[in-house]
Image (tube, rainbow, N blue to C red):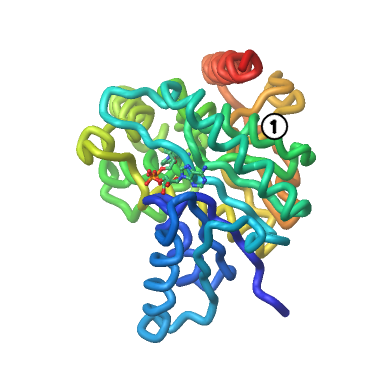
Amino acid sequence: MANPKVTVVGAGFVGATTAQRLVEKELADVVLIDVVEGMPQGKALDMMESAPVEGFHTRITGTNDYADTKNSDVVVITAGLARKPGMSRDDLLLKNAEIVGGIVEQCAAHSPRAIIITVTNPLDAMTYLAWKKSGFANSRVLGMAGVLDSARYAYFLSEELLCKPGDVEALVFGGHGDEMVPVPQLTKVKGRPVTELLEPEVIEKINQRARVGGAEIVALLKTGSAYYAPSSSVVQMVKAIVQNTAEILPCCVYMTGQYGIKDVYCGVPARLGREGVLEIPEYKLTDDQKKALAASAEQVRENCAKLQKQ
Ligand code: TXD
């Protein structure tokens, strides 16, 4: 059987690292596409030249032509501008909407059966835009943020608890902004919720660090934003889709009444498989968390309204 085909749009830091992880893990054949001529081709060739050493059998091709992305199973959109110090994710809204809108039209035309994963910020609004521009069913268009935000939360907790990062199963809900909602009672270490393991003040300090985890990296890097943990997070979602694992991962998905939220994209745990979002199971949140989630969804709705005015 042919390998799954994954197109990664944008061969910058997140796109190239995502492509590298996908081929090295042999999850798919990858097409890496960018507007800059030669750059995706150069990066793809460089990665192929690592195949004899790394020992992977999947292929990566670089291109500037959407015809090469034809019949992709998954399209990951990372193209756009990244945050600079002092910039919010929303500052990127209109500029990246122009870029992402054009890309989605091309990708949807060439791969009408693909699942689209957006990565470009501001994430929730870009996912909504991708859904609108693609004309796809909402179950086939989703965004990556929750896996990353939860991974950061898990890492910070593992440092505090002196445990293996992989032993922390964390859940962060809400939009990909400073209003995201870490959920400690559903965040577990070997089955024990962190609310039983840490004092509330310590948990709140870690919640806050997770909320601004992206900005912490931006402030250190100064010229761009995070890409190692973001690319790992995208790859976990792609794996769930191409291998049809039906696992539950926190993602930006279209809400149809879950948690009282409707007709807007928002970050919640969702079951993923070959057809995209298979189910949005509801978890028990506290009243405060429900309120925070609704407020976060409203912020996304306002951003999407700004896009409609364009
Ligand atoms: O959790 C998340 N969702 C995120 C989102 C985590 C990390 C980064 N996040 C966002 O991803 C970030 O705020 C940016 O909006 C994107 C991409 O970040 P990256 O760090 O990869 O930015 P780069 O290195 O600047 O790469 C962007 C590439 C660059 O090579 C451009 O030439 C290309 O996008 N680009 C395009 N490619 C194709 N088509 C068009 N039109 C185009 N415009 C720019």
Give percent across and percent down for residue 254. 69, 32
**Direction front: furthest residue:** 37
Res 157 seen here: no
Picture quarter containing residue 206?
A: top left
Residue shown at 56%/18% (left/top)?
A: 303
**Location of mark 1 (residue):** 254
Which amino acid is tagged 1? Answer: Tyr
Quick check: 279 left or right of 172? right
Q: Decide which of 29, 234 is in the foreground and name it.
A: 29
- Residue 113 in the image: state x and y as whole percent: 77, 54
Q: Nearer the viewer, residue 64 or 216?
A: 64
Q: In the figure, is residue 208 to the left or right of 141?
A: left
Q: Residue at x 26, y 28 (%)?
A: 85
Quarter for ligand 1? top left
Residue at horizontal 37%, vertical 72%? 46
Q: Please name the residue shown 51% across and 42% down the image.
A: 119
The quarter of the rendered structure image containing the C terminus is: top right
Q: Is residue 248 left or right of 150 when viewed as pictured?
A: right
Cβ at disc 1 under 8 Å from ligand 1:
no
Residue 53, x across and y down, in percent: 35, 84
Badge 1 local density, few (<14 within 10 Å), some, or many (20+)?
many
